[in-house]
Image: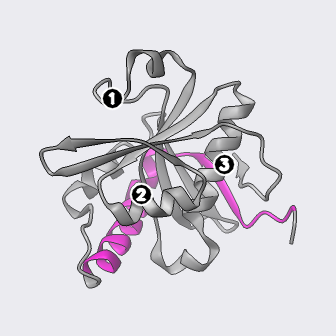
Amino acid sequence: MKGERLFEIRLAVPEDRTCVAGMIHARCDWLEQRELPSLRRRVDLLAEQCGDGTVWVLTTGDGEVVGCTTVLDHGPARDWTEAERREPALYLFSTVTHPDYRSLKPGTVIAHWAVDRAARQERTWVRRGCLDPRLRDYYQAQGFHLVRDIPVRVGTLHVMARHAQKLDVPLPQEG
């Protein structure tokens, strides 16, 4: 129903580390069962960032962590031109969602929240990158466009962007 909020989003705190790690492990299990690459080797590193002021967690109304993303004001210099780096943007990294909530599209909820948040902060872009072409396609379905492909040691980095805009869709309440 329009206007109904299924989720809340807030900055992660150190006490979220165990829940975030568990959520990422669930995603890794789901990916590996489908013979897809996972973040298993980075779970502890990602979870340890909870509380550093950059990680946001998406939660259900009862507080269960169903997603996380890292939001920064800058991206890797190697991925963006000097002119692009001067444009005000939010950069999303390491967005992970719990597979049990796939039908509610928590990844899209996080992306829409970031696009709306960037607009409210008077930024021009939301940017992100990924290595997997299936993830690239998923992000394109969320309205991101491919800026460029960059050859990297482990394959091809798909660098993507979406214009910031205020959205008229149900967004998670920020807490």
Mark 1 lies on residue: 76
- In the rendered view, does 106 fall on the left or right side of 32? right
Q: Which amino acid type corresponds to the residue marked 2 in the rendered image?
A: Arg
Q: How many marks?
A: 3
Which one is in front in this view, the residue at disc 1 or the one at disc 3?
1
Residue 43: name its quadrant. Answer: bottom left
Q: Which amino acid type corresponds to the residue marked 3 in the rendered image?
A: Trp
Q: Earlier in the sequence, mark 2 or mark 3?
A: 3
Q: Residues within 10 Å of mark 2 (few under 14, many from 20)?
A: many
Mark 2 lies on residue: 136
For the N terminus, the quadrant is bottom right
| Vertical order, 99 against 171 (above or below) | below
Q: Which amino acid type corresponds to the residue marked 1 in the rendered image?
A: Pro
- In the rendered view, does 119 fall on the left or right side of 39? right
Residue 16, percent across and down?
A: 46, 54
Which one is in front in this view, the residue at disc 2 or the one at disc 3?
2
- Residue in the foreground of this view, choosing between 17 and 140: 140
Q: Earlier in the sequence, mark 2 or mark 1?
A: 1
Q: Secondary structure at mark 1?
A: loop
Q: Residues within 10 Å of mark 3 (few under 14, many from 20)?
A: many
Mark 3 lies on residue: 113
Image point (38%, 22%), residue name = 81
Image point (40%, 62%), residue name = 135
Residue 27, percent across and down?
A: 37, 71
Residue 10: within the magenta? yes
